[in-house]
């Protein structure tokens, strides 16, 4: 019989397109119960105005949805995907951490260093939205393990590269692995969230941020003493990540079900299509201010400390680790705070709140710089989870694509910014770069244009 005549059709239930009830166990139960109903397999045409709305599925009972939500987060899966993020970003951060070695070995200038970052982050940023768009249509449970293979070969190539062009290719391969990893792993984190989207995104981001902070330490302890060939040792980390991601793919595969016919209705409090577009532009601007400043520190902070205070390369890498570790801690707290108080308020505090400390950093001494970077890292990085989840909730029907866009924008800004800042540092000095970047958090004022989201999507 048609869906409109079904006995349960009078009891619609609004659910988020990314919830596990839509892609997980709940959908599997419903599919098996009504598998003989042909009209449920017809495609749905979604209007532009409906992009911001939750999905209303007529055949989902409130009891079934409540049961799925009561199950809570799948902590084992969240831990596994977060640890994989840790391994992935540990390997990525090695690239920036070995810049001093590459600079000395091959007589590179700051502009060439910036181009290495650009090569790595350009492939990551360019391909992530494409990967997300494709997996929105057809999820690929084992794509994460395959993508990690690119990182594996990229590290091996970087360890034996003796020409600048080969270094760029190796960095691009690592970026390609990142492009495949992030959109689908963000989807898995949301699928395992149990409705606590900000918390799940923070757990996922925590692994990545902590992995990023470990790169300089490992470089100081292993790569600096043993040289460029020791980078090959880290390919074992990539192999471990491949094994874990393959197991996560085994868990993920049964969660992928055929999409069923759905009636799409706008939530009465959801922003309209015009406000969604404005909000997405604002979120990109906030991500720009945050990511460009973080890129200025992660790419050139080592050189800044060496140039201004005369510290050794290993000591400078440890100072960079302090900043990145604070970055990791801040990334964790931002998501749960957004779940509790609203993401808009977290964004106000996270971006604009860092401004006084970024303005003071260029004029602080060595100890003061270390303290200020900790404060900046804690405050600024708490915006990451809220920005990404806010964007996902604005366009729930394009979850993979929007995740890829924002992860891609983050990488693209970092890469392009590193190249531009490197060129600027060659002409004006590294200290001037930090004086200029100190004003970036002022873009946090743009958060005033963000719409108020419905209570079900804060």
Image: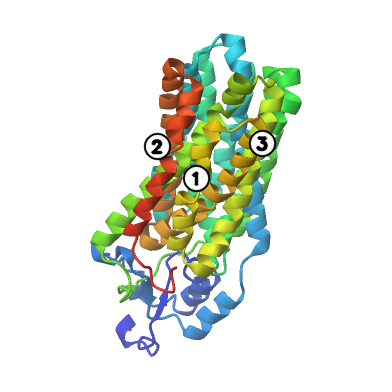
Identified at 62% across, 47% down, the residue is 328
Counting residues from the N terminus, which is met first, the one under dot 3 or under dot 2? 2
Q: Which mark is residue 321?
A: 3
Identify the secondary structure beneath mark 1: helix
Q: How is the image coloured?
A: rainbow
Identified at 48% across, 30% down, the residue is 434
Q: Which residue is mark 1?
A: 356
Instruction: Give the Cα distance between marks 3 and 1.
Output: 22 Å
Identified at 71% across, 17% down, the residue is 227
Q: Position of residue 64 (x, y in %)?
A: 52, 81
Q: Which residue is mark 2?
A: 126
Instruction: Give the Cα distance between marks 3 and 2.
Output: 28 Å
Q: Which mark is residue 278?
A: none
Of badges 3 and 2, the one in the foreground is: 3
Q: Is residue 247 above or below residue 292?
A: below
Instruction: Give the Cα distance between marks 1 and 2.
Output: 33 Å
Residue 68 lies in quadrant = bottom right
């Amino acid at each position: 019989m048609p869906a409109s005549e079904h006995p349960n059709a009078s009891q619609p239930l609004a659910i988020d397109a990314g919830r596990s009830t839509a892609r997980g166990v709940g959908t599997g139960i419903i599919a098996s119960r009504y598998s003989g109903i042909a009209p449920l397999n017809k495609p749905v045409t979604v209007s532009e105005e409906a992009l911001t709305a939750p999905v209303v599925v007529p055949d989902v009972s409130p009891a079934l949805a409540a049961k799925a939500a009561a199950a809570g987060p799948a902590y084992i899966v969240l831990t596994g995907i977060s640890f994989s993020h840790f391994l992935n970003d540990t390997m990525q951060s090695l690239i920036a951490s070995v810049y001093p070695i590459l600079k000395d070995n091959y007589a590179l200038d700051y502009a060439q260093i910036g181009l290495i970052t650009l090569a790595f982050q350009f492939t990551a940023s360019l391909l992530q939205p494409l990967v997300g768009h494709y997996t929105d249509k057809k999820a690929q449970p084992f794509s994460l393990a395959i993508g990690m293979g690119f990182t594996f070969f990229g590290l091996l190539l970087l360890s034996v590269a003796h020409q600048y062009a080969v270094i760029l290719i190796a960095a691009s391969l690592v970026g390609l692995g990142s492009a495949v990893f992030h959109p689908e792993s963000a989807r898995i984190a949301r699928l395992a969230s149990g409705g606590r989207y900000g918390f799940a995104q923070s757990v996922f981001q925590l692994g990545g941020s902590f992995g990023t902070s470990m790169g300089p330490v490992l470089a100081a302890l292993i790569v600096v003493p043993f040289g460029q060939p020791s980078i090959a040792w880290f390919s074992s980390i990539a192999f471990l990540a491949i094994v874990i991601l393959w197991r996560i793919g085994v868990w993920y595969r049964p969660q992928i079900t055929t999409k069923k016919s759905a009636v799409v209705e706008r939530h009465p409090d959801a922003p309209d299509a015009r406000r969604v577009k404005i909000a997405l532009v604002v979120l990109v601007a906030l991500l720009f201010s945050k990511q460009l400043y973080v890129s200025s520190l992660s790419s050139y902070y080592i050189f800044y400390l060496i140039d201004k205070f005369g510290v050794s390369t290993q000591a400078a890498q440890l100072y960079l680790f302090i900043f990145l570790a604070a970055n990791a801690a801040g990334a964790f707290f931002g998501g749960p705070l957004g779940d509790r108080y609203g993401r808009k308020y977290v964004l106000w505090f996270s971006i604009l709140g860092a401004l006084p400390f970024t303005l003071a950093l260029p004029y602080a001494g060595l100890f003061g710089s270390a303290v200020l970077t900790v404060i900046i890292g804690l405050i600024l990085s708490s915006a990451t989870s809220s920005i990404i989840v806010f964007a996902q909730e604005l366009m729930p029907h394009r979850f993979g694509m929007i995740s890829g866009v924002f992860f891609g924008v983050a990488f693209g800004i970092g890469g392009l910014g590193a190249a531009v800042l490197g060129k600027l540092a060659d002409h004006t000095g590294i200290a001037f770069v930090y004086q200029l970047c100190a004003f970036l958090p002022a873009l946090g004022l743009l958060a005033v244009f963000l719409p108020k989201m419905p209570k079900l999507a804060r």
